[in-house]
Amino acid sequence: KQLNQIISSAVKNKKLNSINWTIRPLPKACDLEPQPVLSVKRTSVSAGIIDTSDNFDSEERKERRLHRFQKEAEAEAARKEAESSSTMPIPQPPNTADVHNWDADTIVGTCTRLEKSYFRLTSAPDPSQVRPLSVLRNTLELLKRKWVEDNNYTYICSQFKSMRQDLTVQRITNSFTVEVYETHARVALETNDLGEYNQCQTQLKQLYAMGLPGHAMEFLAYRILYFLYTRNKGDINAAMAAMLPSEKQEQAVQHALSVRAAMAAGNYHRFFMLYLATPNMGGYLIDKFIDRERCASLQRMCKAFRPRLSVAVIAKDLAFTKVDDCIKFLAELNIAISQDESPSVDMKLAYPHAVAAMQIYEKVDIKGQIY
């Protein structure tokens, strides 16, 4: 309070700047114990003055710095260890006892019988009931001859499935394996067994991917035609995207792609021309959906041709080899045919029947889809 009065009086008398405050004594009330003044070492580079009163290279300072750095390093290591232990479990060594050693269980057959019916395995295979590769080669030749001579598909299918089983349990994967699956697939196509065909086609895709020799382009064409039968546009697009330019130039593949283009454009005239010129065994697959395309084409013809159209013209455009077969096809659709010298159809009256016939093809019900 006394100090405040002294300063206020100096301001009032305009002597604040004229008084030497450094030597003016303080009031008695402000007398305090003198506090020790800590000297602060400063280094002034601009003034050229460097305080060297403390030796930074002394052993004591070096020891203190080393101790401090060690403590910081230990703290950082402890922090990282805590984080890793809380977020990442310690990996355990693999339990090899749970891993099955298939190489140790691979068998080599000792059976010498050429013919053996198929039975589903319910236990580990017995080598005495499994035919080795040399015997299986002779079995394939025997089955080819019997199929041509007897044409007994029930017997042939059982024998082929037994061969495939013997190949599988012995883990035989070579060009002969490809030949067995290709032959069985062709026989299944010929007998309209799409279930067995699809099993063979799926396995063949894996075998071709391994680089084994075979008729890969032939079965790629079959695959496209099968997708056209099931109307699986997604798989068709995926198959086309995966094709190499050289594969698209193969005759069978090029034909299958042309069939797809004709169906997509609704060009029934070109579709049936391609149907009559199908290479290999693709015709068996097109036969699965030929009636569906004939009904769809008949709808377009009913809109394009009025009032009547000759049955002979219809038979030619829909790829019937005989006019009688076309008459039978139209009769199954309940389409009236004139009974004169040149049978014809009233296209306006036939249109509702063609539309109704397409309803039975809304769904495809088969077993053994290709994936």
Image: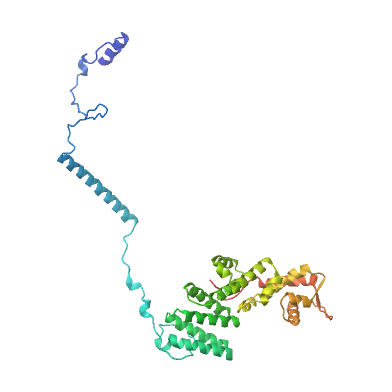
Q: From the viewer's perspective, is residue 109 above or below residue 304?
A: below
Q: From the viewer's perspective, is residue 75 above or below residue 4?
A: below
Position of 59 with respect to 212 (left or right) is left
Front in this rendered view, residue 128 or 255: 255
Residue at 66% in and 66% down? 264
Q: Can the viewer see residue 70?
A: yes
Q: Can the viewer see residue 226?
A: no
Q: Which x, y percent locates residue 24?
A: 22, 13
Position of 20 with respect to 335 (left or right) is left
Q: Which x, y percent locates residue 176?
A: 48, 82
Residue at 38% in and 80% down? 106
Q: Which x, y percent locates residue 267?
A: 70, 68
Front in this rendered view, residue 77 or 123: 77
Residue at 70% in and 74% down? 294
Q: Outermost residue toward the right? A: 340
Which quadrant is the N terminus positioned in?
A: top left
Residue at 56% in and 87% down? 154
Front in this rendered view, residue 47 or 108: 47
